């Protein structure tokens, strides 16, 4: 494996024969050779860490069903970008749900579970404990406040310091000088239009043949002023004139038992330099570890991003003892096989790389390009190897042989360091060190050389997995493992197998991590939170819920939940769903507690208690999690009734499969596809980088123009501030003009708009008046108009609830829209969402104090002339809202911890409402109906439940922002 060739050039030499199996010829093992290797079930033999379609007989050790493997296209679409805020999209969904409301529904089951007489007493007994638990959570959450006390790595240490200040050109400056054309920021494209067409062609456009045919239309190229007239010429411009920090792919051929496999990979050090030196990441990179505390006495430590954890600090100390002044480059690797075709068995085996110096909110977003495709490993079944045990052995050895070849440069670089420049041109001595290998359970076993059924991190017996309550088990002894692996060079085949069996690992010739400095692979294996939870635990929780309560009532409740921007309504219920994706499981999590609240389990058991998780942790919150784990094991017998198994699945980086594997494959002609895929990816990366470079050049032009104008004393308008979205904003133009008061009552349900508006006018002009005085004076208010302009949708940009930079911004929306018929003749039902209102103005980022739930009936503005007469001498309000109120927050429910609210009514049963400023609305708020008996709730529908039901639970699980707010 020494003759590297670029992907385009291929290789002129024959394939390199694979000799990585230390035990010899793969087809000639004896039964003795496989003693103490893997205790595989022969009937489930098709399931191994590399096979893409496991057998149906998957066990509880991480094996998956064929359906689970086919879902990767949709698994993580929600991880990148924000929810769709287009009106047409949400209206179409509402119309579809409204039509589904009229479909047939199964009759009520005859033997519904009824509450046990002792249930109310049990709830009363739990109330004091629930209040105490909530207070503990409040205290813990209060520790995660915006301001933390930072302890940097010892200031007198040169660790994480630059070698010298900016002496090199930045990446963009070097690109500018290489391209020339000082007056053309789009060079080598001749104009903005030329560049835009090229971007469309490579990012959103058709295939190369279709593009060529499009540009062949007479005079089209001339009319558009393009610098290319077909796909070939565009590719030539990209290949020859555009630059990329990311290295090209190297193509190798490997011969395994007379079968040739292609192997595509990149220089790992150049990939690290590309990420570290990307100008887009200039100013956000982290260079040294820190300890964060919630208190000035440094007793309560806070953990969130990678540099605040213990690994970086301890590794920095080890590097400083060897070579002072180095900057740790934590390497995060993820690997997982993916299906490329819906039909057939075409697969790819990508390996991705990112660095821990990037904040996690950048690493997680594919659009920020903080991940890089490092390699395509061969995804072969090795069917020419007839011995199944030999085939499994060869799979493992092949994986580690490829990974060893890729990561070999880290051996020396991790110890001695390499010089590399950040995006601003500053030079550093970086030590790239493998920190994390992320993957699903089979991938964890493959990377760590552990056996199926074992834990890839600690030495717990496989029989005890899932039964222990001890969260502090030590990692596997890596020294013992290394000693066992060394027997391959000094002992016989039998001795090597025996040594590995004693160390409880597979006898792999040379694990890729064996000679990497400062690496403990068992510490590098991390929990697969997304899929172990959503596709694993939640899958079984949903199954238990269906068994416990029956599917009829659960599905009926699904169809009766009110709509919300963050909530998916399962109009057909959840019991009949097949091939459920991780995204769908996540959507179920947001409503699952509301589906079972108030329904007793069999024999009168109370509902399952909420187990919480935090996006950041303090030492106190970690204690809470350990205590929760202990209580879970004490009470989990209730789950055993319904039979559960553990299941592991792929983690969030599978979202990259869509961009870097599936889309790349679809762009090929299916012949020699990996060569085309790598070339397609390289060109796309160049266009991405050029787009960022163009934006940088245009910004520099604006800055120079501004500087020139100021220096010449030329009057200049104040430049617009950087683009940012306000926290709340309605559509630019009203959705309906001239809505009369009577129409507001009939169509929007704003029955008392005139009276509420009069009270608002008095209170706005006289904020110190009492409620009684406001009510009395409002009778004398004259409104010189009878029409207002209405807006049917509000959009929100929800910032980090903790303001610590560890939660990404979230887009939200709330509707206040009457019923109408769309252009296709579909009836779109009225929708008046519930919102969280900062009623007293005392509401903070976290906690319910000062907030109140209300139903948004109308968003409107007053005529301009009326503002002058109603609000003399003050700045009039811009956008107003008509809100129907629910009761204030009190205590949480003892059973499940959710707040209960009830519609506010007057003495005559009228709904109490107010007019408030739009700016007081914090965000949307999802309510879960408190269902009465099934017989009495069957008349409810999703579109009418907010009118039909008076009592609700406030859903804290609609999204992470709401969960952090309603703590």
Image (cartoon, rainbow, N blue to C red):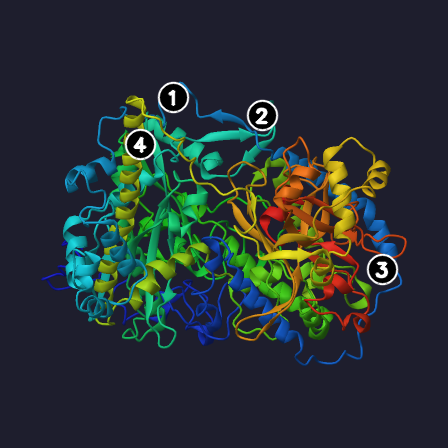
Q: Look at the image and tell me whether residue 854 can be seen.
A: yes
Question: Is 208 situated above or below 613?
Answer: below
**In whole angstroms, how far apart are the C-alphas of marks 1 and 4?**
38 Å
Residue 814 image offset from top left, x and y in percent? 61, 54
Image check: 897 left or right of 185?
Answer: right
Q: Secondary structure at mark 2?
A: loop
Q: Residue at x 66, y 46 (%)?
A: 880
- Taking depth in this image into account, of 785 and 332 the one nearest to the observer is 785
Circle 3 residue? 119
- Taking depth in this image into account, of 199 and 336 the one nearest to the observer is 199
Residue 283 image offset from top left, x and y in percent? 37, 33
Choose the circle earlier in sequence order: 1 or 4. Answer: 1
**Quadrant in the picture for residue 230:** bottom left
**In whole angstroms, how far apart are the C-alphas of marks 3 and 2?**
44 Å
Front disc: 1 or 4: 4
Residue 221 image offset from top left, x and y in percent? 18, 61
- Taking depth in this image into account, of 721 and 820 the one nearest to the observer is 820
Q: Residues within 10 Å of mark 4 (few under 14, many from 20)?
A: few
- What number is the disc on residue 157? 1
Circle 2 residue? 298
Give the number of callouts: 4
Choose the circle earlier in sequence order: 3 or 4. Answer: 3
Choose the circle earlier in sequence order: 2 or 1. Answer: 1
Q: Residues within 10 Å of mark 3 (few under 14, many from 20)?
A: some
- What number is the disc on residue 703? 4
Question: Is 723 situated above or below 580?
Answer: above
Choose the circle earlier in sequence order: 4 or 2. Answer: 2
Q: Residues within 10 Å of mark 1 (few under 14, many from 20)?
A: few
Label 1–label 3 contact, CB within 8 A: no
């Amino acid at each position: 494996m020494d003759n590297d060739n670029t992907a385009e050039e291929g290789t002129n030499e024959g394939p390199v024969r694979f000799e990585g199996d230390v035990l010899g010829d793969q087809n000639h093992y004896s039964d003795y050779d496989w003693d103490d290797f893997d205790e595989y079930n022969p009937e489930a033999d098709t399931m191994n860490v590399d096979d893409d379609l496991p057998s149906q007989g998957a066990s509880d050790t991480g094996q998956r069903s064929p359906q689970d493997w086919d879902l990767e296209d949709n698994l993580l679409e929600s991880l990148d970008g924000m929810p769709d805020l287009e009106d047409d999209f949400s209206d179409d969904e509402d119309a579809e749900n409204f039509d589904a409301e009229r479909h047939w529904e199964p009759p009520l089951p005859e033997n519904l579970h009824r509450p046990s007489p002792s249930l109310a007493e049990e709830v009363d007994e739990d109330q004091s404990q629930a209040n105490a638990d909530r207070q503990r959570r409040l205290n813990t959450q209060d520790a995660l406040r915006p301001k933390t006390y930072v302890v940097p790595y010892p200031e007198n240490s040169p660790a994480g310091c630059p070698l010298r200040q900016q002496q090199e050109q930045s990446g963009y400056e070097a690109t500018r000088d290489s391209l020339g054309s000082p007056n053309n920021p789009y060079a080598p494209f001749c104009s903005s239009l030329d560049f835009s067409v090229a971007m469309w062609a490579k990012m959103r456009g058709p295939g190369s043949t279709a593009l060529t045919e499009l540009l062949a239309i007479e005079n089209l190229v001339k009319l558009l002023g393009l610098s290319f007239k077909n796909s070939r010429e565009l590719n030539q411009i990209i290949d020859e004139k555009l630059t990329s920090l990311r290295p090209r792919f190297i193509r190798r051929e490997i011969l395994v038992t007379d079968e040739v496999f292609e192997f595509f990979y990149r220089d790992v050090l150049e990939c690290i330099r590309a990420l570290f030196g990307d100008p887009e990441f200039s100013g956000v990179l982290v260079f040294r570890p820190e300890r964060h505390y919630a208190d000035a006495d440094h007793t309560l430590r806070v953990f969130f991003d990678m540099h605040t954890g213990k690994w970086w600090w301890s590794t920095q100390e080890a590097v400083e003892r060897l070579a002072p002044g180095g900057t740790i480059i934590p390497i995060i690797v993820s690997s997982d096989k993916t299906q490329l075709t819906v039909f057939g068995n075409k697969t790819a085996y990508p390996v991705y790389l990112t660095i821990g110096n990037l904040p996690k909110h950048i690493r997680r977003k594919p659009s920020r390009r903080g991940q890089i495709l490092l390699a395509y490993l061969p995804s072969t079944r090795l069917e020419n190897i007839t011995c199944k045990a030999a085939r499994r052995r060869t799979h493992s050895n092949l994986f580690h042989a490829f990974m060893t070849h890729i990561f070999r440069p880290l051996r020396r670089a991790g110890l001695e360091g390499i010089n590399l420049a950040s995006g601003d041109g500053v030079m550093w001595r970086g030590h790239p060190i493998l920190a994390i290998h992320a993957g699903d359970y089979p991938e964890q076993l493959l990377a760590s050389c552990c056996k199926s059924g074992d834990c890839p991190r600690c030495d717990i017996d496989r029989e005890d997995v899932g039964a222990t309550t001890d969260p502090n088990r030590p990692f596997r002894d890596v020294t013992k493992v290394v000693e066992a692996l060394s027997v391959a060079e000094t002992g016989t085949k039998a001795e090597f197998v025996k040594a590995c069996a004693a160390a409880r690992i597979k006898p792999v010739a040379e694990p890729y991590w064996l000679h990497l400095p400062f690496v403990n692979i068992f510490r590098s294996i991390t929990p697969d939170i997304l899929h172990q939870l959503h596709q694993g635990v939640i899958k079984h929780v949903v199954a238990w819920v269906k068994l416990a309560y029956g599917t009829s009532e659960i599905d009926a409740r699904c169809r009766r939940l009110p709509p919300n921007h963050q909530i998916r309504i399962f109009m057909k219920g959840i019991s009949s769903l097949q091939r459920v994706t991780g995204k769908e499981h996540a959507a179920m999590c947001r409503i699952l507690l509301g589906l079972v609240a108030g329904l007793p389990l069999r024999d009168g058991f109370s509902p399952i208690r909420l187990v919480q998780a935090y996006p950041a942790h303090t030492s106190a919150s970690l204690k809470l999690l350990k205590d929760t784990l202990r209580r879970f094991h004490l009470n989990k017998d209730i789950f055993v009734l319904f039979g559960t198994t553990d299941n592991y699945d792929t983690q969030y980086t599978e979202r990259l499969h869509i961009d870097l594997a599936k889309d790349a494959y679809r762009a090929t002609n299916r012949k020699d596809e990996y060569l085309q895929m790598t070339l397609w990816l390289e060109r796309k990366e160049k266009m991405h980088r050029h787009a960022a470079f163009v934006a940088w050049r245009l910004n520099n032009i604006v800055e120079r123009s501004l500087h020139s104008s100021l220096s010449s004393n030329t009057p200049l308008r104040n430049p617009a501030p950087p683009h940012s979205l306000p926290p709340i904003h309605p559509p630019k133009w009203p959705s309906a003009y001239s809505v009369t008061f009577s129409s507001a009552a009939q169509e929007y349900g704003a029955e008392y708009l005139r009276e509420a508006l009069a009270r608002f006018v008095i209170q706005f002009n006289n904020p110190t008046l009492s409620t009684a005085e406001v009510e009395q004076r409002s009778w004398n208010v004259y409104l010189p108009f009878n029409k207002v302009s209405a807006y049917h949708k509000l959009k929100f940009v929800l910032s980090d609830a903790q303001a610590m930079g560890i939660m990404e911004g979230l887009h939200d929306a709330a509707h206040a829209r009457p019923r109408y018929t769309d252009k296709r003749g579909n009836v779109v039902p009225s929708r008046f969402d519930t919102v969280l209102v900062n009623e007293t103005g005392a509401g903070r980022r976290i906690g319910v104090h000062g907030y109140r739930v209300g139903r948004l009936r109308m968003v409107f503005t007053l005529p301009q002339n009326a503002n002058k007469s109603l609000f003399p001498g003050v700045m009039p309000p811009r956008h107003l809202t008509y809100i129907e109120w629910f009761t204030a927050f009190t205590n949480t429910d003892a059973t499940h911890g959710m707040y209960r609210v009830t519609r506010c009514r007057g003495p005559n049963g009228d709904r109490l409402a107010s007019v408030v400023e739009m700016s007081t609305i914090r965000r949307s708020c999802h309510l879960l109906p408190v269902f009465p008996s099934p017989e009495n709730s069957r008349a409810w529908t999703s579109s009418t439940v907010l009118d039909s039901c008076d009592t609700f639970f406030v859903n804290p699980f609609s999204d992470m922002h709401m969960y952090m707010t309603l703590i």
